[in-house]
Image: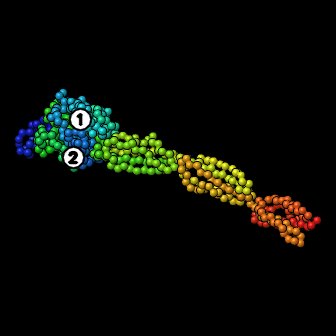
Amino acid sequence: MHTHTIKRASSKKVLSVFLAAALLITMLLPLPQVAEAAPPAKPTPVDRYSVVDGRVLPAALAGDTSDWVELARSGGYSLIVRKNVLPIGQVVFDTRNISAYNISSVRDLVNNWFKNTLNKSARLRNFTVTSNAVDMKVAGSLGYFANISAGYSTPTGIKASTGDDIAFLLSFSEAAMFCSRQYATTTTTYTTSPALAVKNFVKLTPPGPEVHMKDFWWLRSEGHLAGSTKNACSVGTHATPMTGCVYASSSQAAYPYVRPALWVNSGIFQTWGTINVIGVDADNPDVELYSYTLNEYPEGPYGPIGPNDVRFFLPGVLDPDSDPISGTLLGGDVIDIKYLHTRGTATITVVHYDLWNVWEIDRITESVPAGPYGPIEPWILPDFDPAIVLDGSDPLVGEIDIDEHFYIIFGYGKAVFNVIIKHEIVGEGEFWVDDFERPTGSYGPYIPLDLYGYKGYWDDTSDPPVGECWIVGSTIIIRFLYEPL
């Protein structure tokens, strides 16, 4: 494989002899050691990632001089790797012959590229997030040689447009599972990578001809220790049958290249987002007053997006938990704007009017919620007919807008009976008749007219001239008779 074994096996021999010799020499080397205690190498499923047939992010959208290739997704985030290696040529892992990425010069090169070389306005910076790829407090964050159970970086979701370790190198396991053709299982054996890893590997631009010592790129995981030579993991063609294999390279051998990786918000692959706008009743938040969605809203400035006008409600007030009504929308963003609307008020005055005595019985003025109202019921008053709605009154039921003032006017007529008073000269007949209505209850007393030359008196065969009547609509007939003096 690619340690001293590969160097010794790089002479031009028949391929079968070459591979056999390479494996034999490797087996004759001292027993490989691991720089730090590695967890068991038994493969376990990568269940927190969705390995993908990655999308390609064009350089123009990245704001870089290279396209980027998506390898895997975790939640709403994507692990992407640069399609082209950094244009810094072939570099040693570290001039001090160490293989610990966290103190290596190759880590400094990656950090310097992201902080200082990548354009300050690169679109990538709007989507990059921190991760635990180089978190030394997390066991196995750097990964281990021939181990596909550790070294899987995790995005935090915390935006970071610059800083150390935002960009990083892939680990052994990430390269093996996400973008390679083959990977080592021991110092002398290797196996074919998963189908999606092979697909993603093909999308990457080889740093050099796919021949020994020309197409390698560094990883952040330490390699095995063969003798006294320090080595770190890399991807490259370690022998003709081992194209695109994840293995190890000498830390001071100046032929691997640098291919950084990033965790980014997955929205980076699109140039639009979504804006959702909703208005609700402030007192009953489950009551939706309106909602609409602005689909495929172009990336860039948006807003201000104000509230809708809603009949019967005051202008909306932005919910404290709402997204801003204006700002900058990035690809894939979902902006949720929420307005709270308070129902406005109106005024209704109800007037009760005595039609018999022509005076106002009562007047009640109340503030009411704008919107539907009623029906407003009249009173039931003893000794009065059922109320009627007078001309000029507003409807008893309907809708009233904010700040309107409605008047409901009820008229109450007394319950009445008829009174007929007849005046009759004896022997000559009637000469005068009074016909009128009286409210139920007491009536009278009624007396005869003062008629000159005549004496008037009550005809006791008629209804009495004084008394009570409680029968609505009945008629009392009172007769007065007159005789000459």
Residue labelled with disc 1: 118
Residue 317 picture location, percent across and down: 47, 42
Question: Callout 1: few (<14), some (14-19), or many (20+) C-alpha neighbours within 10 Å?
Answer: some
Residue visible at 87% across and 71% down in the picture: 428
Q: Quadrant of the N terminus?
A: top left
Closest to the observer, 338 or 129: 338
SS state under label 1: loop
| Residue 207, placed above or below residue 194 | above
Residue at the far bottom in the pictured view: 427
Of the residues shown, which amino acid type is indicated by label 1? Leu
Residue visible at 27% across and 47% down in the picture: 51
Which is nearer the N-term, disc 1 or disc 2?
A: 1
Name which quarter of the figure residue 437 lies in.
bottom right
Distance between the alpha carbons at the discs numbered 1 and 2: 24 Å
Foreground disc of the pair 1, 2: 1
SS state under label 2: helix
- In-image side of 343 versus 55 (left or right): right
Residue visible at 86% across and 62% down in the picture: 449
Residue 325 picture location, percent across and down: 40, 42
